[in-house]
Image (spheres, grey):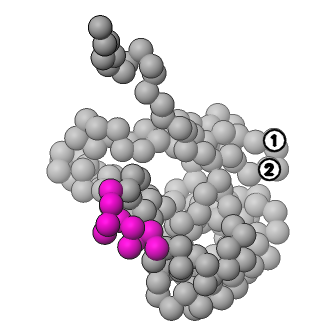
Amino acid sequence: MLYGLSIEDMISVWRGELELVHRITVWPDPRDLMMAGSKLFLQSIICWAADSMGQIYLHTPSIIPTVELMERVTTGTLAAVLKREFSSHGQHVFSAGTKDAVAKLQRAIDREEVTYEWAHGEFNRPIWFLQPFVAGLKYLGEIRVFLVNGTFFKSIITTPGEPGRPLEITEPIMLTPLSKLRCVCLP
């Protein structure tokens, strides 16, 4: 059970959403939401945008996580963070000092095997990847805003937690202030 749904339920809901999109306008489009969960797709867009302006944006290598790699990451001998696509709130983020990292990684991989084997290719299997470790995030946090062609694309807030606790990673809800909405006054 994932989010209170069986895999069969998830497939049924997904197929129903896709059928609905073909019949009426749905916003946000479920296919867009699925792509939003792909951190590497977002990074590809950022890389293409940077390249189009003659700039460089560090490419993130995808990898197959192993116990050996996890030990290098969690001991700090590899200054990197191991992450997984289609994950939120730091659930699949491992860095130096992550407690019980090997056991957590094994549980995540075991769950993936069961979920994606059973889903028969209905959903994209998450990809694991490495990013450089940025020490300031542990102590200062950050607000990261992605703009493409001057248009807001996505934002992420990283908040430091208590010592020994994981960072809190959230996407802020962007609301348009009422003062910015146009008013149509009726006589």
Of residues 56 and 175, which is closer to you in this image? 175
Task: Report whether 42 appears left or right of 56.
Answer: right
Q: Are there few (<14), some (14-19), or many (20+) residues within 10 Å of tag 2?
A: few
Query: Above or below — where is 32 with respect to 125?
Result: above
Residue that numbered label 2 is attached to? 165
* Amino acid on which the number 2 mark rests in the picture: Arg
Q: Quadrant of the N terminus?
A: bottom right
Tell me what residue is drawn at x 62 percent, y 47 percent: 169
Residue at disc 1, secondary structure: loop
Tell me what residue is drawn at x 44 percent, y 69 percent: 17
Residue 106 % position (x, y): 73, 80
Residue 47 % position (x, y): 30, 56
Is residue 18 found inside the magenta-colored segment of the image?
Answer: yes
Tell me what residue is drawn at x 48 percent, y 61 percent: 37
The kind of secondary structure the magenta stretch mainly shows is helix
Residue that numbered label 1 is attached to? 162
* Amino acid on which the number 1 mark rests in the picture: Glu
Query: Above or below — where is 149 with respect to 33?
Result: above
Magenta extent:
16-25
Q: Are there few (<14), some (14-19), or many (20+) residues within 10 Å of tag 1?
A: few
